[in-house]
Each structure stands twice: as C-alpha cells, then as structure tokens.
C-alpha cells in the first residue's frame, strides 16, 4: 500500500494508541467526580493540558477541548457572533476555507450577518490591500486558515493580524488544522485557533479551540461540568491524554521531519513535472501538499484507478461537497482544472520508493484512461 492522503487523516502513532489504552484501563473515574478515581483522572487531564499549552505557547486556561476542528470552527464562529452581535454583523473570510468554516458562515448569513470574501492574488495569498479595504467599524470577525487543506497555500498570519488588530473590536480566528506538527504557529497573533488531533498521528474525535484568555464566547454546548465553562460534557480523559502524547511526538525531531518532507516534496514535484499535467500548488504552499490537475480525465476516475493499485490520494478535502474543488478554482480560476484535481499529501514517513511506485502506476493509469477515451 502507498498512502498519500495524510492531509485527510494520519495513521495513529503506536505510542499514542498505547497511551490511550493505558488510560482507558487505569483511569476509569469521571474527572468530575469527587472521589479518588475522579481526582486522579482530573489530575491527568490537568497535566496533559499543561503539556499541550506549553508546546503551543499558550495558557492552560486557553485550551478548550472539542471533538475536532469542525466543532472548534463552529464554536469559534458562532460563539463570537452570538456574543458580540451588538458590535456589528460583518465577517471577513476567504474562498480557501474548509467547509466547517463556510457552512456556519452561510448559516449566519441567513440570520442577518454579512460575509465578505477577501481577494486572493495569483498565488492564492490574501490580498492585504483588499483586506484593509474590507475592514469596517462593524467587522466583528476575520476567519482565515493558516494553510489551505487542498492546495496547501500558507497565509501570512503576521501580516493579516497587523491589519485586523487595528480594529480593537475585531476578533481574528484561524483554522490551523493543517499547520500543527508541520510548522510552528505564533498563537499571540490570533484570538482563536482550531486544531484537530487526527492530523498529527493522534486519535480521531479529539481536538481543541485555543481561545485568548480574556475573550468570552457563547458556548455551543450548554449544561454539565467540564474542563471549561465554554464547552460542557464529561471530559474524555483517554483522548485528552493521547492528544498530549501525539502533540509531543509531533514536535519531536521537528527540523529533521521538516527536512524529510521537503526532500520528498522536491522529488515528487520533479517527477510530476515530466508528465502532461498541471501542478496547482506553488512556492507559497506547505510542502506536505501537492495539488495537481489532470487533462481530460476526471479526478474520481483516476482516484479509483489508483485505489485498485492500493495507492491512496484524494480529490478534495474529505469533508467537502460539490463536484469541483473550490480551493483549486479560487487559485486557478479554471473550473475544468478544479474539477480534475488530485491532492497528494505527504509525511515524513513517505519514502522515495513510494513516490516511484506512485509515479509508475499514475503514468500507467493516465495512458490507460487516455486510451479509453
């Protein structure tokens, strides 16, 4: 098998599984309970939270556990707009956002909020002049992802933050799901940030929203004691402990892992450049993602052809809907390319041998499918 869909989800690190299993067996108490088993579970959660906060450079009180980034994105967007609707009803975002950003924004638009999409330049980067132009006194939220999950465009959060910060009433949220474990984020630039553990070799079903300590938002889920007043529900002790373990491992030998991905990225791009395809990712993209478009072949047809060879890539973000990639279209302005795009996503675990096998089978599939037409 050749797995090249790491941006959709990563295989769980064996050490993370071991941590999850051990905590399930040894910490059976409800962390909200007052007896010893509950106290022990709460202590483990507090220790795990401090580890997560220290790695990310935030405070423990700023970590709100969620089921993943989709919940965190909804919590951030709806929570801000519900709490601060008295300040205004204007929101700014981009066409490169995940569906868990776009969908709640559409919901808010149906409830009286106004959403503007900032222009992107030819590389998919936020047009900073247009962002300045769009900013208004009643802009309550700017939500822009750090890295697009389909093309890999990496935004300049520092430059964006400087513009947003000029209005003290505007809150800056970023979905940093595709960044954690791949690049280091300065969370002081942000008011809110969404994270999912499954993107850095952790368990599915756990993530968090980083919320600036003094910022108050309206919860999505009410009722029941938890680790924070902003998200009710019994804390998932095994998932939280495994989250901390996965994050520690993600940043272990960080520079070495980054170098490996860069090398494998360059090797892949050099091979792809010899083929009659479009490469949609550019120099401003994270090296973990290489997005391409086929000529005359539907992306889903190619995906399943490769699947028969036990090679796994994706067409769009796994949570996306529609018959073409909105992100590829936002960058290329070519709907045909957007409907024929494939995302190849890499890891420090990816090898040159896997890339060679992918290129061989991919080339064979192109010839076969071209002939079939």
Image (cartoon, rainbow, N blue to C red):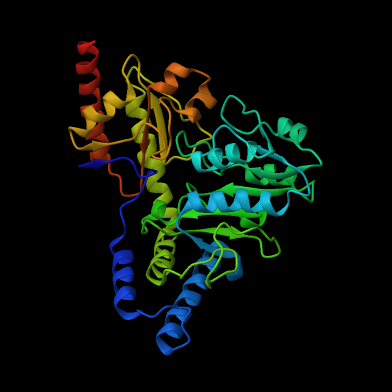
Q: Position of residue 347 (x, y in %)?
A: 36, 46
Q: How many marks?
A: 0
Q: Nearer the viewer, residue 254 or 288?
A: 288
Task: Identify the image quadrant of the N terminus.
Answer: top left
**The quarter of the displayed image where residue 16 is located:** bottom left
Horizontal relation, residue 147 to residue 338: left or right: right
The image shows residue 99, relative to residue 41, as above or below, that is: above
Q: Nearer the viewer, residue 254 or 190?
A: 190
Horizontal relation, residue 82 to residue 356: left or right: right
**The quarter of the displayed image where residue 248 is located:** bottom left
The image shows residue 177, relative to residue 302, as above or below, that is: below
Residue visible at 34% across and 50% down in the picture? 10
Residue visible at 50% across and 30% down in the picture? 327
Residue found at the far bottom of this picture: 36
The image shows residue 144, relative to residue 302, as above or below, that is: below
Q: Position of residue 253 (x, y in %)?
A: 41, 59
Horizontal relation, residue 12 to residue 200: left or right: left
Q: Position of residue 164 (x, y in %)?
A: 73, 44
Q: Nearer the viewer, residue 50 or 85?
A: 85
Q: Position of residue 165 (x, y in %)?
A: 75, 48
Q: Examine the rendering and report whether any part of residue 184 can be seen.
A: no
Task: Identify the image quadrant of the C terminus.
Answer: top left
Q: Examine the rendering and report whether any part of residue 19 can be seen.
A: yes
Q: Nearer the viewer, residue 326 or 131?
A: 326
The image shows residue 27, relative to residue 333, as above or below, that is: below
């Amino acid at each position: 098998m050749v797995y090249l869909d790491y941006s959709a989800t990563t295989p769980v690190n064996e050490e993370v599984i071991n941590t999850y299993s051990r905590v399930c067996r040894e910490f059976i108490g409800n962390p909200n309970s007052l007896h010893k088993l509950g106290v022990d579970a709460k202590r483990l959660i507090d220790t795990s939270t401090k580890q997560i906060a220290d790695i990310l450079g935030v405070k423990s009180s700023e970590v709100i556990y969620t089921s993943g980034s989709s919940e965190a994105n909804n919590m951030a967007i709806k929570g801000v707009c519900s709490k601060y609707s008295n300040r205004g009803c204007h929101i700014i975002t981009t066409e490169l956002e995940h569906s868990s950003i776009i969908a709640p924004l559409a919901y808010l638009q149906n409830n009286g909020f106004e959403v503007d999409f900032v222009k992107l330049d030819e590389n998919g980067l936020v047009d900073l002049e247009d962002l300045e132009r769009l900013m208004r006194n009643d802009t309550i939220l700017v939500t822009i992802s750090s890295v697009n999950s389909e093309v890999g465009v990496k935004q300049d959060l520092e430059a964006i933050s400087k513009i947003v910060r000029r209005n003290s009433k505007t809150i800056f949220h970023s979905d940093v799901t595709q960044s954690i474990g791949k690049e280091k984020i300065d969370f002081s630039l942000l008011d809110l940030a969404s994270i999912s553990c499954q993107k850095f070799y952790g368990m599915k079903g756990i993530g968090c929203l980083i919320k600036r300590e003094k910022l108050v938002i309206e919860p999505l889920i009410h009722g029941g004691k938890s680790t924070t007043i902003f998200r009710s529900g019994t804390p998932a002790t095994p998932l939280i402990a495994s989250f901390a373990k996965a994050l520690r491992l993600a940043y272990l030998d960080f520079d070495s892992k980054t170098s490996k991905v860069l090398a494998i990225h360059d090797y892949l791009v050099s091979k792809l450049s010899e083929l009659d395809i479009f490469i949609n990712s550019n120099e401003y993209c994270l090296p973990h993602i290489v997005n391409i478009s086929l000529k005359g072949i539907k992306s889903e047809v190619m995906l399943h052809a490769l699947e028969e060879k036990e090679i796994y890539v994706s067409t769009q973000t796994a949570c996306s809907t529609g018959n073409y990639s909105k992100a590829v279209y936002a960058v290329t302005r070519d709907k045909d390319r957007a409907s024929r795009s494939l995302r190849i996503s890499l890891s420090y675990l990816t090898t040159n041998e896997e890339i060679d096998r992918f290129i061989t089978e991919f080339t064979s599939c192109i010839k076969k499918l071209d002939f079939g037409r």
